[in-house]
Image (cartoon, helix red, strand yellow):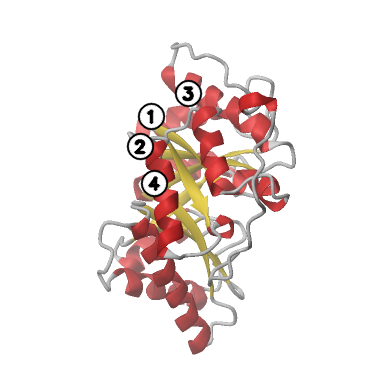
Amino acid sequence: MKIGCISWSHRKGFQEGKMDVFTWMEHCKKDCGLDGVELWNNHFDSLDQIYLKKIRQKAEELSLSIYSVATKCIFGDFSEEEIRCAKQVMRDWLEAADQLDAPVMRISVAGKELHDPIHQEQVFTSLAEVVREGIYPKIQVGIENQEPGVVQNIADVKKMTEITGGCIKLILDNGSFLQKDDSYEFMKQTLPEAAVVHTKFFRIRADGSDEMLDYEKIRDILEASDYDGYLSIEYDSQEPAVRDVPKIATYLKKLFARGQTFPDSEVSLAGGKEPVCVKHTKCGTPGRE
């Protein structure tokens, strides 16, 4: 398994203008020692090809894999026009993911009464139709489970797989449950459908472990399933991600290495300062949330 991070984890740094995609990737490599990165759509300045090429070149320079691009498709009230727009947003971001050579695109779904069976089927069918256009066959598209959301439980994953014929995968969020203990059985049952696993951290201890989720149990589930994809750190906290994500990354490395030793990650960036960059302009492209 490889370890990465979604840029949503550092959303506060982006919002405050202290980070952009480029300085964030440097942090992920130099301070966290990550294998790859997952880019959240809110953190793109644009979908211009020149800009996307710069992101890809930076990742290559840092020897980081861009393993996923994360976006949102908004279905609203499920009118014909809103469904058409949601599908176009998906196409736009698939093109961006292709430019970045990302093998996975994560979709968060927004809309009215998403867990309504008719709305569920409309979402699954609509996204599968775009995938079956066959323009980007190397990219796996996955819906992230969210409670509440269009995919909330094991039955929803089975329904999604049945309706789409397996062409829409799961982005497995192990912390997106109102009752956190629901996470473990969900993982056991749905890991075969997972393209990426989001490893959620809420309140970390000094060693980087989480107070709310049992990561030794999660490790055992992952290893028993022979999951060999990315673990994407998702830090859901108001605490400083620049300080804490390196601790989380070191903890996960030790946890999955079973006895190997790693040097402690540096908490601060080179020179002891947080990255500072010119404040970026919020992307005005579709799917901006």
Q: At label 4, which amino acid type do we have? A: Gln
Gap in angstroms between the C-alphas marked 2 and 1: 6 Å
Q: Residues within 10 Å of mark 1 (few under 14, many from 20)?
A: few
**Which mark's residue is nearer the viewer, 3 or 2?**
3
Q: Which residue is mark 3?
A: 253
Q: Which residue is mark 4?
A: 57
Gap in angstroms between the C-alphas marked 4 and 1: 33 Å
Q: Where does the image place residue 136, in percent across and percent down from the top left?
A: 28, 64
Q: Where does the image place residue 276, in percent across and percent down from the top left?
A: 67, 41
Quarter of the image where the N terminus is located: top left
Gap in angstroms between the C-alphas marked 2 and 4: 29 Å
The residue sitting at 25% across, 69% down in the picture is 134
Q: Which residue is mark 2?
A: 227
The residue sitting at 45% across, 83% down in the picture is 84
Q: Which residue is mark 1?
A: 223
Q: Where does the image place residue 142, in percent across and percent down from the top left?
A: 41, 57
First-in-chain label (2 vs 4) = 4
Which secondary structure lies at badge 2? Answer: loop
Which of the pair 196/101 is nearer the observer?
A: 101
Which of the pair 186/257 is nearer the observer?
A: 257
Q: Residues within 10 Å of mark 2 (few under 14, many from 20)?
A: some
Tell me if I can see residue 44 in this picture.
Answer: yes
Q: Are marks 2 and 4 in contact (CB under 8 Å)?
A: no
Q: At label 3, which amino acid type do we have? A: Lys
Q: Are marks 2 and 1 in contact (CB under 8 Å)?
A: yes
Which secondary structure lies at badge 3? Answer: helix
Which secondary structure lies at badge 4? Answer: helix
The residue sitting at 34% across, 36% down in the picture is 228
